[in-house]
Amino acid sequence: MRKLLVIAGVTIAVGLYFALDLGRFFSLDTLKSQQAAIEAYRAANPWLAAAIFFAVYVAVTALSLPGAAIMTLAGGAVFGLLWGTVLVSFASSLGATLAFLAARFLLRDWVKARFGPRLAAIDRGVERDGGFYLFTLRLVPAFPFFMINLVMGLTPMRTWTFYWVSQVGMFAGTIVYVNAGTQLAGISSLSGILSPALIGSFALLGIFPLIAKKIVDGVRAKKVYARWTRPAKFDRNIIVIGGGSAGLVTAYIAAAVKAKVTLIEKHKLGGDCLNTGCVPSKALIRSAKFLSHVARAEEFGFRRGASADFQFSEVMERVQRVVKTVEPHDSVERYTGLGVEVIEGSARIVSPWEVEFVRHNGATGKLCTRSIVIAAGARPFVPPIPGIEEVGYLTSDNVWELRELPRRLVVLGGGPIGCELTQAFARFGASLGNTVTQVEMLPRLMIREDPEVSELVAARFRQEGVDVLLNHKAMRFTTENGEKTLIAEHEGREVRIPFDAVLVAVGRVANLKGYGLEEIGVATTRTVDTNEFLQTTYPNIYACGDVAGPYQFTHTAAHQAWYAAVNALFDPFRKFRADYSVIPWATFTEPEVARVGLNETEAREKGIAFEVARYDIDDLDRAIADSEAHGFIKVLTVPGKDRILGVTIVGEHAGDLIAEYVLAMKHGIGLNKILGTIHIYPTLAEANKYVAGVWKKAHAPEGLLHWVARFHAWRRGE
């Protein structure tokens, strides 16, 4: 209602302005012809004249009406240079601020809902440097001030910042126009007030804040580097510390653009993903899925009693064979062939441009480089629970050393890693009478997903024999009479959970120690602190991947690596802000869960308006044929529009199906175009088209369809 009242008020005021042709009073000829009368009124009523002038000026600027330039001249002509400048300066800033607030009140929520993800980077830039940019725009009269007022109202800039920057920034132009007004008789047109030389001067003045910012950044950088001696020349363009996904991609890009690059890895190339994460876990999950299909043999038309004879040690050997098969993709030989110098050993940063290394054979050396990229990755977090060291524990790093299936396994953690391994081990133990208990301190599994997703996954786990214990906080571990026990707290009471092995999967922590960050003063919190360009405390030292956050996925590590590599190699000539606008991920449980963009939970938390289109996959022909008729696709869109805000897919091959939506969101493709795209029948991908059809049906033009129905009735002669 308040918005409607404001819109009505503004509409009436602007309408009256044009309906009554009030613009005729804001012309140079009118001002000249009425100058004597206005001055006489001002002489007889000085304070009232000033108040009327001030109020009219505020109204004109607040409503973004034409006439501010003429009124500025009038201020000089009637009140003189000093008082004219004072009146115009404060009236223009106040009116501009009112226009700013009106735009924010009326349009900000709509713009945020419509273009929010695309404007996120702009908003961050305004929050950081908005004052500089506004000051620059205010100093250059060539930019329409009313447009600046409206656009800035759509940003998160604080009102006070907008006001005082406008007050200061417009002051120079105000003086020029007010002074011109004191010489009104000699002015023949508004364009004559600003000569090309004066406009050029303003433009140079407008650039000054940006130059000043660069100077300030340079001074800060110089201060950071003050205790170091910069080498006269460098051995390398870039040194990469860490040979996981982020480090490998960084080195690959550097070599591809013919830079001299050295990659240092102290363990194995490929990092966690190849050796202890993505690759081995998916190999284990695939074997476990085969067992689950054997258990479901009757669903596929086979007789009861189907079974699979297996040795867990042989399954784990298959996992290692898969790792060995993929290993050449990330091998020393491959990257050496690409032009990367690979050093197998440990690294230590000893200055912003120098890295010492110790090879595995004991040989040492030091390299000098223009830039350093930290890609040291992360490791499993082991919480300091009393007794955990005494009972021993597994993590996603060493679980692959198992060759005997634990009889009673406890998994701590209900996140993606914990859920994937819980289900896999439960499936192997199902036919052997082994048990898996999953302990999660939060009220549901996979807390980042919507509640209905968590419920589906938990229900499947329980169906497959997993004892899912939610709201259970691990308190301590004990060993009594040779039996290991986890003591957990649940609703104020202690719960005893006996086990033979415990797998800790409660998250990962960045590797921040052991390679010189503390010694040279690189700022860290839970990760290496970086700016939007992935620069650390030292502008020539970058960080990417798990060690930098905010996401800990292999694909985001590779995504960040592009920015780190390009910025490290080409700054200060060109650098790019890391773009996190469209980040997909998947959890490879069954049902598989994949997501990109917002889900309902996040949208509500952020106050973003949305609509939901949902298609249940149990209606899909291919899913029925595959006996995988479960799950759903849920798409969040801008209200009344087909623009996608986020997608959640639960079901078979969700991680593959999500790719169509990742592409759509990245390139601004809406549901209408997905609906108009041919999808092969019968495939699971048809579900993407059907959910677009659900959205289309909900937004059918009922009024138009009513008239179309009458048209067809007329053609039938009815």
Image (cartoon, helix red, strand yellow):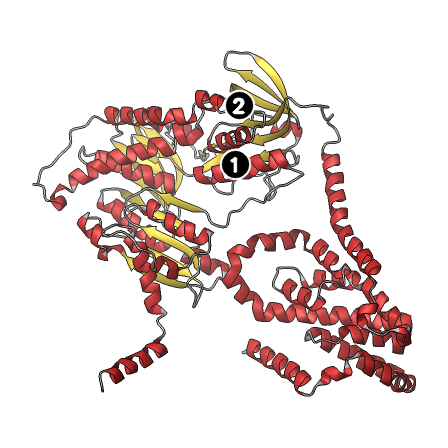
Quarter of the picture holding the C terminus: bottom left
Q: Which residue was labeled with disc 2? A: 264
Residue 220 position within the rendered picture, expressed as x and y whole percent measured from the top left: 73, 39
Q: Residue at x 74, y 57 (%)?
A: 135
Which residue is denoted by mark 1 in the rendering?
Answer: 561
Q: Nearer the viewer, residue 435 or 331?
A: 331
Give the quarter of the image for residue 709.
Answer: bottom left
Of callouts 2 and 1, the N-terminal one: 2
Residue 91 lies, with reference to residue 711, above or below; the image says above
Pinpoint residue 688: horizontal percent, then vertical percent. Answer: 32, 55
Please indicate, yes or no, whether residue 523 appears anywhere in the rendered image.
no
From what the image shows, is residue 169 above or below residue 12? above
- Amino acid type at mark 2: Ile
Left or right of 401, for residue 681: left
**Residue depicted at 66% across the width and 34% down the height:** 538
Quadrant placement of the N terminus = bottom right
Write the residue at 60% across / 15% down. Answer: 365
